[in-house]
Amino acid sequence: MRRVLFDSDVLLDILMSRQPFVIASARALSWATVPENEGFVAGHAITNIFYILRRKVGRDEAIDLITSILQILRVASVTETVIDTALKSSMADFEDAVTSAAAESSGAEAIVTRNGADYVKSPIPALSPDEFLGMQQAT
């Protein structure tokens, strides 16, 4: 795999040091620091992450944390086409459908998430951080 989209839950695990998930999530994200790999985050996830972080650590720290993530990940655009695809999706949760459509539009081969059940109907396979790491070790 060379292109992967990271769901907001995995990024929040890292940014908020959420136990016991932070270690696997951080190890999965480190994959995106290898030059031949491309990691993405859906554009709409940035606003959600900021909102959650701002309430926990304040505005300035939230900006710093998001800036640090964006030094590693590219933003998968949420365009009119992505929204249209999500609206036509059979996925139950619209936000997850937007994430899936953004992943597909960016050419991602997988979505790294702790909520795999939410992506059962996604055309892009969902992997937990541990599953993703296991696949990387096997290659």
Image (tube, rainbow, N blue to C red):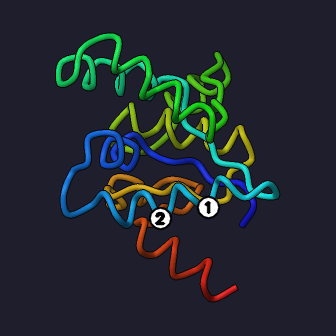
Q: Which residue is denoted by mark 2 in the rendering? A: 27
In the picture, measured across the screen, residue 72 lies left or right of residue 63, that is: right
Q: Callout 2: few (<14), some (14-19), or many (20+) C-alpha neighbours within 10 Å?
A: some
Is 94 placed above or below 57 here?
below
Q: Are marks 1 and 2 in contact (CB under 8 Å)?
A: yes
Where is residue 74? Give x, y as percent: 67, 35
The answer to which quarter of the image holds residue 45 is top left
- Counting every numbered tag in the picture gives 2
The answer to which quarter of the image holds residue 129 is bottom left
Residue at 25%, 25% (x, y): give it.
Answer: 52
Secondary structure of the residue carrying tag 1 is helix
Q: Residue pushed farthest top?
A: 59
The amino acid marked with disc number 2 is Arg
Which one is nearer the viewer's eye here, 58 or 121?
Answer: 58
Q: Which residue is denoted by mark 1 in the rendering? A: 31
Where is residue 84? Give x, y as percent: 59, 24
Q: Residue pushed farthest right?
A: 36
Secondary structure of the residue carrying tag 2 is helix
Q: Quadrant of the C terminus?
A: bottom right
The amino acid marked with disc number 1 is Trp
Residue at 22%, 22% (x, y): give it.
Answer: 57
Which one is nearer the viewer's eye here, 58 or 106?
Answer: 58
Where is residue 56? Give x, y as percent: 17, 24
Q: Quadrant of the N terminus?
A: bottom right
